[in-house]
Amino acid sequence: MVNEATFTYSMQVENVFALVGGLGIFLYGLQVMSAGLQKGVGDRIQNVLSIMTQNRVAGIFSGFFTTVLVQSSSATTVMIVSFANAGLMNLRQAISMVMGANIGTTVTLWLVALLGFKVKIDAFALPSIGIAVFLSFVGNRQLKLWSEPLLGFGLLFLGLSILKKGVPDLKGNPEALEFVTSLADYGFGSVLLFVLIGTVLTIVVQSSSAATTITVTFLAHGWITFDLAAAMILGENIGTTVTAQLAAIPANRTAKRVAVSHTLFNVLGVIWMLPLVGAFIVAIQSAFVTDSPTHLAIFHTTFNVLNTILLVWFLPQMERAVYKIMPRKQSEQG
């Protein structure tokens, strides 16, 4: 009995280390990939943003493509805040870009859902790292620039592989299953609880991409049901706004308003979706015959697209609401 208990405890500790280590590698890979992509395309993005934000639709597309290119909605929102702080972008342009960034951030979950759970990750994660290291030593500057994004890509999926192995199967852990089931016994209260969990998780890891990856991993292993995973996704949409709030702390009032608008946009989206989330989930599961990770990616993207389509028509009203929350000072112009 003692040996069995010791073995069980050892396995649990090993799982915790795998979860923490896998998440750490995933986050570092995401950071390296984002930083590398920004080095490669950052200057070009800044040069065309002023042209691409002339109207709300162009702003949405610029926010979307910027986030896809740099693979980080946090990096995009920080960029938007800094542009607003420098006076290169007005509040309405910034809000439209934030809307597009919210759609762009869903691409990471698609990568994880389509590749991370359907193919052997190590088959391309390790070669990506090997090629990246080789490119870092070549003399060609353009090739060297691609070493960082490729290294980040490999580390990201290597971290996901470790993360997946660190999540124990619930069939062999009935106590954990009982705990998770107890959290799902409160009806709509459970949905609100998991919205809160998703929000806190994103604030803690400081990355909506990492938070959604954890969520889809738990869903794939049976730790949570699809409706609770969807609730966590909604919470993660709120949690991701904290990055913009932090970036705006030392900035001027225009930049702070951008951060407020980001929070307002995401919170309003979650509010209108919450009463409809059950029907929304049923519709997705009926319309698409696929696995649960892909269902979650569909939910994430569809929600953000619909939220943008709905609220973009109220952009002037949102702008006025932000000015009511944070009024102009006499010293401000316009």
Image: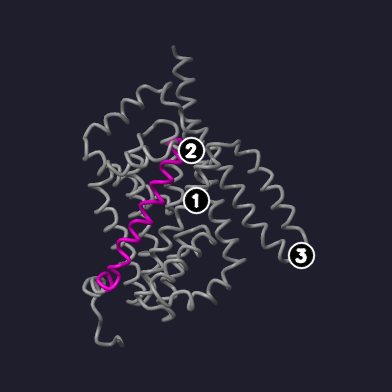
Chief secondary structure of the magenta portion: helix
Mark 3: amino acid = Asn
State the mark number for residue 19: 2
Residue 3 point in image, percent of width and height: 48, 15
Q: Residue furthest right?
A: 139
- Disc 2 on helix, strand or loop? helix
Q: Quadrant of the C terminus?
A: bottom left
Q: Nearer the viewer, residue 183 or 41?
A: 41
Mark 2: amino acid = Leu
Residue 209 colored in magenta in the image: no
Question: What's the distance in space between the residues labelled 3 and 1, CA to CA?
Answer: 29 Å
Q: Earlier in the sequence, mark 3 or mark 1?
A: 1
Q: Earlier in the sequence, mark 2 or mark 3?
A: 2
Which stretch is magenta?
A: 290-319
The residue tagged 1 is: 108
Classify 10 Å Cα crowding around label 3: few (below 14), some (14-19), many (20 and above). Answer: few
Which quadrant holds residue 118? top right
State the mark number for residue 140: 3
Question: What's the distance in space between the residues labelled 1 and 2, CA to CA?
Answer: 19 Å
Residue 98 as seen in the image, left or right of residue 141: left
In the picture shown, does residue 12 fall above or below 157?
above
Residue 86 point in image, percent of width and height: 43, 80
Q: Nearer the viewer, residue 43 or 251?
A: 43
Residue 282 point in image, percent of width and height: 32, 39
Residue 228 point in image, percent of width and height: 32, 39
Classify 10 Å Cα crowding around label 1: few (below 14), some (14-19), many (20 and above). Answer: some
